[in-house]
Amino acid sequence: MGAIERKPLPADLVRARSRFQAWRGRRKLGERIPKPLWALAARLAKVHGVSRTATVLDVDYYGLKKRAGLATPPSSGPAFVEWPSSAMVGKQCQLELDNGAGATMRVQLVGYDASDVEALSRSFWSAL
């Protein structure tokens, strides 16, 4: 397999990386990234993507995604969808109808209503 050819970094990402490196060079231990640098990183993430920007600037991917407003909002729909009860599965029958003139009909019904069985039977026997 051939090597992956990478495009050169855009100038704005290079400038931002040098700003982050300069801040890291003079920061105190445990000091958080300043808000102006996070704002810069968020703007760049919207242009160049969160993954690439987080990698180049060496910042937390999920923190950058949240600050850039690109995190997926919680869905407003239900988190759980209830399916109908499986009680209809137990409601099965097999019928064999014979009209006395030699015509026979076999039917297997699942989840039926009694009125449907009656209508089917009447239409079969009245078709003589």
Image: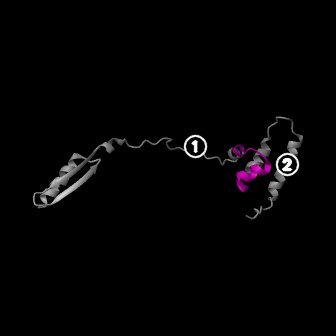
Instruction: Classify residue 85 by image quadrant.
Output: top left
Here the colouring is one colour
Residue indicated by mark 1: 74
Q: Quadrant of the C terminus?
A: bottom left
- For the point 75% across and 49% down, the residue is 54
Q: Please, what is the three-letter code of the amino acid marked with disc 2?
A: Arg
Q: Secondary structure at mark 2?
A: helix
| x and y, in percent, of residue 106 in the image | 22, 55
Where's the N terminus, which quadrant? bottom right
Residue at figure coordinates x 41%, y 43% from the top left:
83
Left or right of 47, for residue 121: left
Whether pointer 2 and pointer 1 mark residues with C-beta atoms closer than 8 Å, the reply is no
Q: Label 2 belongs to which residue?
A: 19
Q: Residue at 21% of width from left, 46% of height from top? A: 114
- Quick one: SS at disc 1? loop
Residue 10 x/y as whole percent? 80, 59
| Vertical placement of residue 10 versus 54, above or below | below
Place residue 86 in its image quadrant.
top left
Q: Which mark is residue 41?
A: none
The range drawn in magenta is: 44-63
Q: Amino acid at mark 1?
A: Pro
Q: Rate crowding at label 1 as few (under 14), some (14 to 19) or many (20 or more) other CA atoms within 10 Å.
A: few
Q: Is residue 18 magenta?
A: no
Name the foreground residue: 5 vs 113.
5
* Residue nearer the viewer, 106 or 35: 106
Towards the viewer: 84 or 20: 84
> In the orientation shown, which residue stands out farthest toward the right?
26
Where residue 105 appears, as percent x and y from the top left, is 19, 57
